[in-house]
Amino acid sequence: MNLLPKSAKEFGSVDYWEKFFQQRGKKAFEWYGTYLELCGVLHKYIKPREKVLVIGCGNSELSEQLYDVGYQDIVNIDISEVVIKQMKECNATRRPQMRFLKMDMTQMEFPDASFQVVLDKGTLDAVLTDEEEKTLQQVDRMLAEVGRVLQVGGRYLCISLAQAHILKKAVGHFSREGWMVRVHQVANSQDQVLEAESQFSLPVFAFIMTKFRPVPGSALQIFELCAQEQGKPVRLESAERLAEAVRERQQYAWLCSQLRRKAKLGSVSLDLCDGDTGEPRYTLHVVDSPTVKPSRDNHFAIFIIPQGRETEWLFGMDEGRKQLAASAGFRRLITVALHRGQQYESMDHIQAELSARVMELAPAGMPLQQQVPFLSVGGDIGVRTIQHQDCSPLSGDYVIEDVQGDDKRFFRRLIFLSNRNVVQSEARLLKDVSHRAQKKRKKDRKKQRPAEVEDLPAAPEQSIDKSYLCCEHHKAMIAGLALLRNPEQLPEISLALLVVGLGGGSLPLFVHDHFPKSCIDAVEIDPTMLEVATRWFGFSQSDRMKVHIADGLDYIASLAEGEEAQPRYDVIMFDVDSKDPTLGMSCPPPAFVEQSFLQKVKSILIPEETSKMTEVEQKKQGSRISGPSASSSLVVCT
């Protein structure tokens, strides 16, 4: 039996609904959920003694079940005479105080302010099928009547799928009337989520529009979103932001439904936000391992990445996460990165916070009530202390943070928040500093202090381990110097180096300290980075190391094209990335590898010279000069 209309417009037709209920008979038809699925929201916003009007009641059992749990002052209306007759016959004896009336909700016969609640389950969605003028006029009459029959302080509680045009109309109408607007997502239990693998994937929302007494001249508008039945509502600044937040939750529900249906979505990641502030709190990556054979206990697991280690290859790159998932041996692994600026008490606290939400991402076929393990490295959530946070006019927002590595040593990092998963500069802290940081961490945990930026005095120079290069590309660049001279001779040879890109200063500082006869010019485009390197990474200039605040492209061009143009460097190192976020990670930026620029680089390098020493003279000095020459030039870039 096909009860669907030929077009959506028929939902607004009396004839369609008469035929619908004649064919369906007395079997209840529930839009958007049963009483058990909706009772959490209904009981939150309707008091048992309040007078309730249900518009477009149909043959839903919702009113009957509300009546049976104590809500007995209920009036139901519908335009279908057939369904009103059916409902009267069903409830005359068992629910004598509940009334059913045939009535058009756009022309209701009740006096003004007759009700404290108007309940609408799917009726607005059925009427507002398009945005044609005739349809919008009908909806305006309906909403105006809702406002007329409600008392001040009363609520219009509308259960809806919150499609964009419906949300826009409802929110726009009542906010202009000066009502408070709240959108509340109807929560599903874990069992309902796992059983709903083949069902409709759009989430259900409740609009709660609260009628305020009109205040002449007031432009106050209140928009709130409540994502969970017991959650605290979040105040939003505009109707547009409210619509955006609803759309995000609809997209999340669609994503969950696709993951349950084994859809091939490629790399999947999402942010879970703090319910009170709306700020990102967790970043989740969904990693499936199709080669893992399913068994009773290997369906699903959650891996908590310790704070500060989210940038490591194993946790921060797709291939690394795939390797981690395969090693863990689960069909689906969710990796969870913890955001800086958020407070995390313990692994148990994180598990309690995430348990309900991550179950929505469980794979198809996972048994009900399956225990899902939470995994981590050493069972710890890691340590991250934000030492300083600021904004550079050129590089944008950045943070200086100390994090604990897998060997329990602490590392200081410079992170640009425009690319928060990339470590811009890194230095290892000395052991005594790491020990103090661990003691401080334990003390802070006892106090349970909120997360905050600790803008402490500058770290003393001796707190940085200058003998250690953290970045692998820096190690490769230093190793590249062996192409220039015999490695054993390098510390005793006078080298002129140009380093383009300062960052935290680790690379030029290492060259300065380990090659005592070297002279280094460092070029940095952002003056803020020189302050950061000096204050937080133990960098300092000397008679052998100078920093020039300039664009590296312009600096080299000026040397190559100026009146005193001449070769002057044995080595030029490029350690720069792009300031253009649209290019992603680009090291060096494209302009640094253009042919015309490379010609300028070549012109300021000291040209290769053939050794004049004879083999006998070399032996007399006890040395063996490696490579093609005794003096050559080198360009190293990342």
Image (tube, helix red, strand yellow):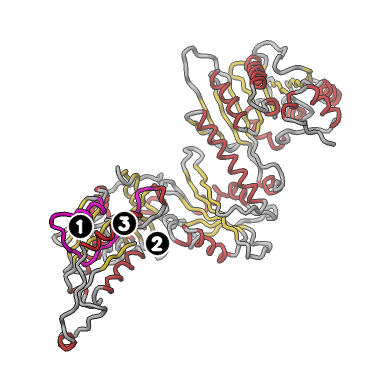
- Please tell me which residue is depicted at 71% across the width and 44% down the height of the picture: 199
Whether residues under marks 2 and 3 lie with C-beta atoms below 8 angstroms apart, the answer is no
Say whether residue 218 is visible: yes
From the image, state whether disc 1 or disc 3 is nearer to you.
1
Q: Which label belongs to residue 228? A: none
Disc 3 marks which residue? 592
Whether residues under marks 1 and 3 lie with C-beta atoms below 8 angstroms apart, the answer is no
- Please tell me which residue is depicted at 54% across the width and 59% down the height of the picture: 375
- Residue 445 appears at what percent x and percent y? 41, 51
SS category of the residue bearing label 2? loop
- Residue 40 appears at what percent x and percent y? 65, 35
| Mark 1 or mark 3: whose residue is earlier in sequence | 1
Q: Residues within 10 Å of mark 2 (few under 14, many from 20)?
A: some
Q: Quadrant of the N terminus?
A: top right
Q: Quadrant of the C terminus?
A: bottom left
- Tell me the quarter of the picture where residue 111 sits: top right
- Residue 336 appears at what percent x and percent y? 51, 53
Where 153 falls versus 585 (above or below)?
A: above
- Closer-to-camera residue (616/5): 616
Identified by mark 3, the residue type is Phe
Let me know if residue 420 is in the magenta part.
Answer: no
Q: Which label belongs to residue 405? A: 2
- Please tell me which residue is depicted at 55% across the width and 32% down the height of the picture: 243
| Mark 2 or mark 1: whose residue is earlier in sequence | 2
